[in-house]
Amino acid sequence: MVRKETLRVLSGDGVRVRSICGDVHIPRKDLDQVMNTEALDKESKFEADVIVLACKAWEVERCLKMCQPWCGANTLVLPLQNGVDAFGTVRSIVTSWGKGRPLVGWCNIVAAIQEPGLIKHWAANPPCIYCGEFEGAPTSRTKHMESVLASCEGMAVSLEHDALSKCWEKFSFICSTTAVQATAGPSATQDLIPQVPELEQMWRSAMEEIIAIAKKSGIDYQQSWMEKRIPVLRDAIGATTSCSRDLWAGRHSELEDLLGSVHRMGQEKGVPTPVISTCLRALTVRDQLARRATTLPIYPMLEGQKILGTICNHQGQQLPADRTLAQKKAAEYLRPEWFVCPMTSAIATGGQCEVPEGVQMLWEAELGVVISHSCENLSPHEALDYVGGYCMVLDLTGGNLGFESMKYGHSWTRNKCQNTFKPVGAFIPASVLPKPESSRIICRVNGKTVAEDEISKMKFTIAQQVADASELTPLRRGDILLTGAGSLGPLAIGDLVEGSIEGLDAKYTVSATLAGEVPKCSPAPLATILESSLLQLMLQRTMCAAYAQEAE
């Protein structure tokens, strides 16, 4: 049972797995029935042998209820979530149906969806599924399921006689490791925790809190289990938990199902949980932002990772000039072309742009689109849902570095992305600028207006640009997309350049002063600089066309 883009891919190409155990491709014909969760009433009904809940913990209730028509008297329900809260939910729902048999289950695999239909598996060899009954010995039906899973090449399965206690052992490890990792940051990989005394002590304290709750809940938790996990940490070089990765990437996470459940159970059973509860509070804002449960201002230079700029997106710079507008639209600009700068290229408004010796700088004032939530592979119709607001950006360029850039693979990095080349203005909430396409951008140099560009004259709309950029690379909260400028011109050392939106409060204006040594010789004429940039662009396109022809 799948939905949306995953449904489309599985219905066509099937499933691909890139695995340390060997890559696998399961074609569509071997997937049997692929069901659309958004149209289940149209799917054929049958009695399932096993319902495997492979969703995230917060989706268990919704997903399980969708499966009711396929649950028969002998159907086994196998949850594989992190955490222990899901077991109570599964048991309660299946019992209320009066049919089916809920199991305790979990898995050991380090994997992630790389893109719809493609799964990357990079640790845990072989991957293993653990399962068992809530009480008592395994039934013949459960044993048969174990034998079927065990017969799968590259798969291990373990039928546990005290499944609930063993699951608490995994829960304590995942939860305490997530608490330490997610709070400390991506550098706190699992192998690092035993190497840093402060991190190991934090991890042990978190484990002890969960063990105390387990024992208060009647779970037979063996103290030796914690010590056995230390070598596991040491051997997990570079490993991180999925919840930590989701939090860092701004995605919906299982924070509430892991740390949140420990905090709640601790309160219910009178067990203090100072470490887990403190980490939970520290991470809650990240999780709420991903869930869109809170609205906070966005600080691109602190939260964002990159600035993506579109090349010649404004009609004022539709190059080359000797072609008709129809030719340019049809042949040259079928989709946005991008350069990418790290956020470390940016400086706050009012700062100084440090000009390298001998470089002739050019000004462009552009509207920056600020991403509000992590996203990828968006369509234009949903792209604006991920726009949190805007900002003014000065896209300063080392114009005479065009030829120099060509030596580095036709990259725009050297002339666009050097330190301080991207002054960024204050964040403009979307509510302050509800219709950016009807706005006009004003650029001033030393107080004199040098450009008035209409945003409506962009070749690609904001929605089209966001969608295209999200296909190129995953976008994160605070990332900035530059929408293009209709004008550009030369700057000299000491010049003050400003960019603003006509009619908008002056606090949103971006400004910067050029700093550096005054050149001893006259800079190259602007026409020569523009010719250099044009030649670079034309060579870039020629190379792309040549590669495409060769590929064909």
Image: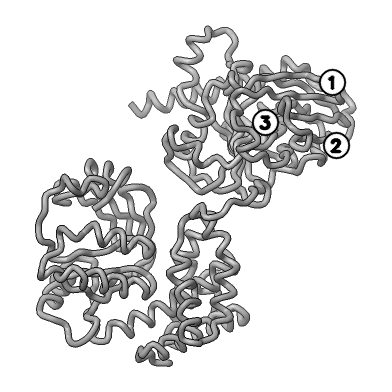
Quote the CA–CA distance across marks 2 and 3: 22 Å
Task: Name the front one of labels 1 and 3.
Answer: 1
What kind of element bears circle 3? helix
Given residues 317 and 164, the one toward you in this image is 164
Say which quarter of the image contains residue 61: bottom left
Query: What residue is at 72 percent from the left and 25 percent from the top?
Result: 502
The amino acid type found where label 3 is placed reads Glu
- The spot of residue 441 in percent (x, y) is 70, 24
- Which residue has dot 1 on it? 448
**How far across and how far down the image is residue 77, in percent?**
21, 69
User: Are discs 1 and 3 less than 8 Å apart at CB?
Assistant: no
Q: Nearer the viewer, residue 140 or 153?
A: 140
Side of 106 relative to 434 (left or right): left
Q: Identify the mark nearer the N-term, 2 or 3.
A: 3
Q: Is residue 355 left or right of residue 258?
A: right
Dot 2: within a 10 Å radius of its alpha carbon, few (fewer than 14), some, or many (20 or more) residues? some
Residue of label 3 = 404
Q: Three-letter amino acid code at disc 2?
A: Ala
* Of pointers 1 and 2, the one earlier in the residue sequence: 1
406 is higher (above) or lower (below) than 423: above
Sort mark 3 into few (<14), some (14-19) or many (20+) by Cα contacts within 10 Å.
some
* Of 62 and 420, the residue lying toward us: 62
Residue 230 seen from this side:
no
Is disc 1 placed on a helix, strand or loop?
A: strand
Cα gap from disc 1 to disc 3, whole angstroms:
31 Å
The percent coordinates of residue 243 (x first, y second) are: 46, 64
The residue located at (44%, 82%) in the rendering is 229
Q: How many marks?
A: 3
- The label shown at residue 515 is 2
| Residue 450 sits in quarter | top right
Please give the name of the residue rendered at 83% of the width and 34% of the height, measured from the top-left corner: 514
- Circles 1 and 2, Cβ within 8 Å, touching? The answer is no
